[in-house]
Amino acid sequence: MHRDMMPSFELLQPAKLVDALSLLDRRGKDIWKMAGGNDSLDWFKDRVKRPKAVMDLGGIAELKGIRETADGIEIGALTTLAEIANSPVIQSKFKVLAEAAGRVASPQIRNVSTIGGNVSQDARCWYYRSGLNCYRAGGNTCFADTPAGMNREHAIFDASRCIAVSPSDTAPALLVLEAKMVIKTAKAERVVDAEKYFVGPALDITHMTILKPEELLVAIRIPSKWAGAKFYFEKVADRNTWDFALVNVASALKVTNGTIEAARVACGGVACTPRFIKVVEEVVKGGKQDEETAALAGQSAVHGARPVNYNQFKVPLMENLVKRAIRDAA
Ligand SMILES: Cc1cc2nc3c(=O)[nH]c(=O)nc-3n(C[C@H](O)[C@H](O)[C@H](O)COP(=O)(O)OP(=O)(O)OC[C@H]3O[C@@H](n4cnc5c(N)ncnc54)[C@H](O)[C@@H]3O)c2cc1C
Ligand code: SF4
């Protein structure tokens, strides 16, 4: 691994969104978008990805900050995770997102990492990050999905040739809050449900999101629908300092007199996309927020899991996290 010097690239530093979009419109295929750089710079330093041009989005003020809107909040894609974790409005209305952002990596990384980068980051599979020519890198094999492969961190659902997982801690929180992703090109805007932002390998094995080269994620909208609900976030990692989740869970519950009227639960680290667990919504609706309902939710959440050699522990781990996400949401 050559960590001495990055290969050279053309550096683009637009100060306005309109200029960034115009550059992407003309030269999108050659441009790597860079926000905080915490994922990007690793790729460049390891010389695994060698873009012709890098667009540093850091100077675009329009993409930063948290705004209250008529129906909820809008978070600029370049807002840092630290700002989200410490935001009074997010802490009071959408605590699950503040907690998830606050559990990413370390304080130093959260100070520069952005929410846009967190949901658009690439897979962390060791083989792929090392520059091996696996399916995700355009090759014709998966090094992790072999009897002796290092697949402890990998998927237990929805694998399709690639078994890497979605590593984002904020993505499950955004899914339960029914967030919308605002995507722009020089010519148009589209708004997609957070769930549809992420793509699995069956659809596109070389990308983790639906973004096209000419598109930029500009903001994330969170509707007020779940404001003030009961929430839960938990992340289990090998180390309690900076580390990626083995499994994480986020939930939002509406409970009246102890009865669950509505619930949303999502997990990261278990599939190539953050996994919204629809069946839990149906299993817990109308039930009491208690041990029994929570146990049923956990069991149903892992139904159909297909672990590989070294990640079988993820099945009971996910079951217990979902159980706690129902029982202990507050
Ligand atoms: C040591 C270390 C520990 C980490 N631990 C965690 C962890 O515990 N949990 C976790 O979730 N993540 C973790 N990460 C991963 C990741 O770096 C951070 O989550 C971070 O949020 C990435 O944000 P960034 O702005 O620095 O991303 P960048 O590196 O700037 O971007 C990441 C990717 O997103 C794309 N992108 C960025 N912004 C946009 C945009 N607005 N529109 C379109 N595409 C965009 C870039 O092109 C790039 O592909 C860790 C990273 C490191 C280096
Ligand atoms: S799990 Fe995916 S990223 Fe990892 S080696 Fe296999 S194909 Fe490549």
Image (cartoon, rainbow, N blue to C red):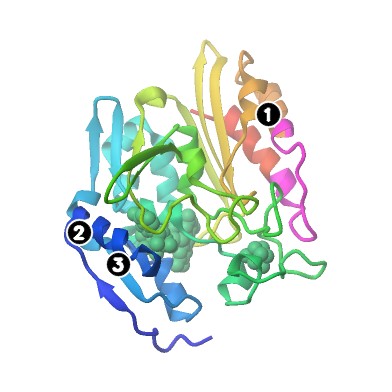
User: Magenta residues?
Assistant: 299-317
Q: Along the horizontal axis of the image, is 3 left or right of 313? A: left
Of the residues under marks 1 and 3, which one precedes in the sequence?
Answer: 3
- Residue under pointer 1: 297
Q: Which mark is residue 211?
A: none
Q: Residue at x 54, y 19 (%)?
A: 262
Examine the rendering and report whether any part of residue 104 can be seen.
Answer: no
Q: Residue at x 29, y 49 (%)?
A: 83
Q: Secondary structure at mark 3?
A: strand
Q: Residues within 10 Å of mark 1 (few under 14, many from 20)?
A: many
The x, y position of residue 325, in whole percent, is 58, 34
Q: Which mark is residue 55?
A: 3
- The type of residue carrying mark 1 is Ala
Of the residues under marks 2 and 3, which one precedes in the sequence?
Answer: 2
Q: Secondary structure at mark 2?
A: helix
Q: Residue at x 34, y 30 (%)?
A: 93
Q: CA distance from mark 2 to mark 3?
A: 11 Å
Q: Along the horizontal axis of the image, is 217 left or right of 67? A: right
The x, y position of residue 330, in whole percent, is 48, 28
Q: CA distance from mark 2 to mark 1?
A: 48 Å
- Residue under pointer 2: 19
Q: Residue 24 occupies which quadrant of the picture?
A: bottom left
